[in-house]
């Protein structure tokens, strides 16, 4: 405990001696030094003895006290002759034996308080200590400010908290159902009186944010899912044979949508069976095209994701599409027709990747003397000859299978004009197996009949044109194909 002698020159009262571990200075009635003025904070500063020195602590960073006309933001040691300024109040410091003497006065009028108290001749330092009778008192050097100390921080926080608990009801604190009027309308509390985070503001904020969140969720759901799931994803049993999914979706949202994980990964994870693996060709991967770009959902119960892929092909691949896919443009392929993939005796067909060609299980492989054009020619003819049945009006071999003369009328020189018209006889239109429902009209392009996206799909786009060995209607002739240029 320390002794403090308080002399109030601004009030008509005798000097008061206080024995305490620290003094609080401010407008709050519970402060040991009460300075009743609106510019003074409720608890603005504090004084405490540490190691035989008294220190001034700033407890309101936004409204710091001044020591000898210098703002104190942390703490400063006090010496006899110092003058503290807290708005209109001056506190002159002195020492008397084992006590700290604080003389409080108040300045009235527009006067520089510090200059008025110590005189204009004093520029720096502190006032000299008063001289006791019988000689001069040795001046004690001013101590250095205290470093940051958690113990002192806890001490002042506890003192301020205890003082706040003793606050009595006051008109300075705003309450509801107050009398309205000009005075009430213009009243604004100081920062230390402002009620931080009122419960009503917090509650109404949560309510408003909650309503907006629910509204946004419904709006997003309606915008993203304008219609119910298709029957393919709402059924509780797998209807496709052979199965192309690990399990039925059964109208579940979380099988595809989740807060973590990628939807593309979920698609490929579910559509991964012996008969079908959800793969994407390299050009589409390079263009950033994934499953949901070709197979959108939420278009109604009768919607079929497979049909959407066929429509999506011509939606993107046309001259009117000005969008770029990773910097690359697309255009209408084959001049808008199902053309033979040879232009000026040069194969424009890119061929089949080596790893994908192995899945075809065709008894032909590339040799070292094969050029790129020759290898593409071998691939192209191998997937057609003696594997595909002829359609009405097309010549073929004795087993009704596709042969060279089915597409070419001559070979010396080789006829490349007729195939441009015969390709469309097979590679066009699409019906649904089992129901024979027309999925793509016969006069419309069927891109996926030539360009296979899912190379690990064991199903064929039109099984009716294949030999029986490949899932068609007629047996295949066991011959060795000798493919020449």
Image (spheres, grey):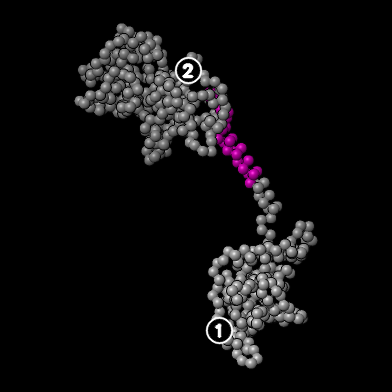
User: At x 72% / y 77%, what residue is drawn?
Assistant: 17
Of the 4 image quadrants, the one containing the C terminus is top left
Determine which quarter of the picture holds residue 36. bottom right
| Coordinates of residue 425 in the picture (x, y in percent) | 37, 17
Of the 4 image quadrants, the one containing the N terminus is bottom right
Q: Secondary structure at mark 2?
A: loop
* Residue under label 1: 123
Task: Please say if the residues under marks 2 and 1 sit with CB atoms less than 8 Å apart.
Answer: no
Please check the rendered image and state whether residue 16 is part of the magenta-colored stretch, yes or no. no
* Residue under label 2: 241
Left/right placement of residue 316 relative to residue 71 reads left
Q: Of label 2 and label 1, which has the lower sequence position?
A: 1
Q: With respect to residue 473, does 96 lie above or below?
A: below
462, 438: nearer the viewer: 462
Q: Secondary structure at mark 1?
A: loop
Determine which quarter of the picture holds residue 125. bottom right
Instruction: Give the magenta part as a residue range.
Output: 209-234
Q: Residues within 10 Å of mark 1 (few under 14, many from 20)?
A: few
Q: Calculate the distance from the C-alpha at mark 2 to the C-alpha at mark 1.
A: 99 Å
User: At x 57% / y 66%, what residue is drawn?
Assistant: 149
Tally the numbered discs: 2
Q: With respect to residue 30, does 346 lie above or below?
A: above
325, 138: nearer the viewer: 138
Left/right placement of residue 361 relative to residue 430 reads left
User: At x 39% / y 12%, what residue is drawn?
Assistant: 472
Q: Which residue is at the far bottom?
A: 134
């Amino acid at each position: 405990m320390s002794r403090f002698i308080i002399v109030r020159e601004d009030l008509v009262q005798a000097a008061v001696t206080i024995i305490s571990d620290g003094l609080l200075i401010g407008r709050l009635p519970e402060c040991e030094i009460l300075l009743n003025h609106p510019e003074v904070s409720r608890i603005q500063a504090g004084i405490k003895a540490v190691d035989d020195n008294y220190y001034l602590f700033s407890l309101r960073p936004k409204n710091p006290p001044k020591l000898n006309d210098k703002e104190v933001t942390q703490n400063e040691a006090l010496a006899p002759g110092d003058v503290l300024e807290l708005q209109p109040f001056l506190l002159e410091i002195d020492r008397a034996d084992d006590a700290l003497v604080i003389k409080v006065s108040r300045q009235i009028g527009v006067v520089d308080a510090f200059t008025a108290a110590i005189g204009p001749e004093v520029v720096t330092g502190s006032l000299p200590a008063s001289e006791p009778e019988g000689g001069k008192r040795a001046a004690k050097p001013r101590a250095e400010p205290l470093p940051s100390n958690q113990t002192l921080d806890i001490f002042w926080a506890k003192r301020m908290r205890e003082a706040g608990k003793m606050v009595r009801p006051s008109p300075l604190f705003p309450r509801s159902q107050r009398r309205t009027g000009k005075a009430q309308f213009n009243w604004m509390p100081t920062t230390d009186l402002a009620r931080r985070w009122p419960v009503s503001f917090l509650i109404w904020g949560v309510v408003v944010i909650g309503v907006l969140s629910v509204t946004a969720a419904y709006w997003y759901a309606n915008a993203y899912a304008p219609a119910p799931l298709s029957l393919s994803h709402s059924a509780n049993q797998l209807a496709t044979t052979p199965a192309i999914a690990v399990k039925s979706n059964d109208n579940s949202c979380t099988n595809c949508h989740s807060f973590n994980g990628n939807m593309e990964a979920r698609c490929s994870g579910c559509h991964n069976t012996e008969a079908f693996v959800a793969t994407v060709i390299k050009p589409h991967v390079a263009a950033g095209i994934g499953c949901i770009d070709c197979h959108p959902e939420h278009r109604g119960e009768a919607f079929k994701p497979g049909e959407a892929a066929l429509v999506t092909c011509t939606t993107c691949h046309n001259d009117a599409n000005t969008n770029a896919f990773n910097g690359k443009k697309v255009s209408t392929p084959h001049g808008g027709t199902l053309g033979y993939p040879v232009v000026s005796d040069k194969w424009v067909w890119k061929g089949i990747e080596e790893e994908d060609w192995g899945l075809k299980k065709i008894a032909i492989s590339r040799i070292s003397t094969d050029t790129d054009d020759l290898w593409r020619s071998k691939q192209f003819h191998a997937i057609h000859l003696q594997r595909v049945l002829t359609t009405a009006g097309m010549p073929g071999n004795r087993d009704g299978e596709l042969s060279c003369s089915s597409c070419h009328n001559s070979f010396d020189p080789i006829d490349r004009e007729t195939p441009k018209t015969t390709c469309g006889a097979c590679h066009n239109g699409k019906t649904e197996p089992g129901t024979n429902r027309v999925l793509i009209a016969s006069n419309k392009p069927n891109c996926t009949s030539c360009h296979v996206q899912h190379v690990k799909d064991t199903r064929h786009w039109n099984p009716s044109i294949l030999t029986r060995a490949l899932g068609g209607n007629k047996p295949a002739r066991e011959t060795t194909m000798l493919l020449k240029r």
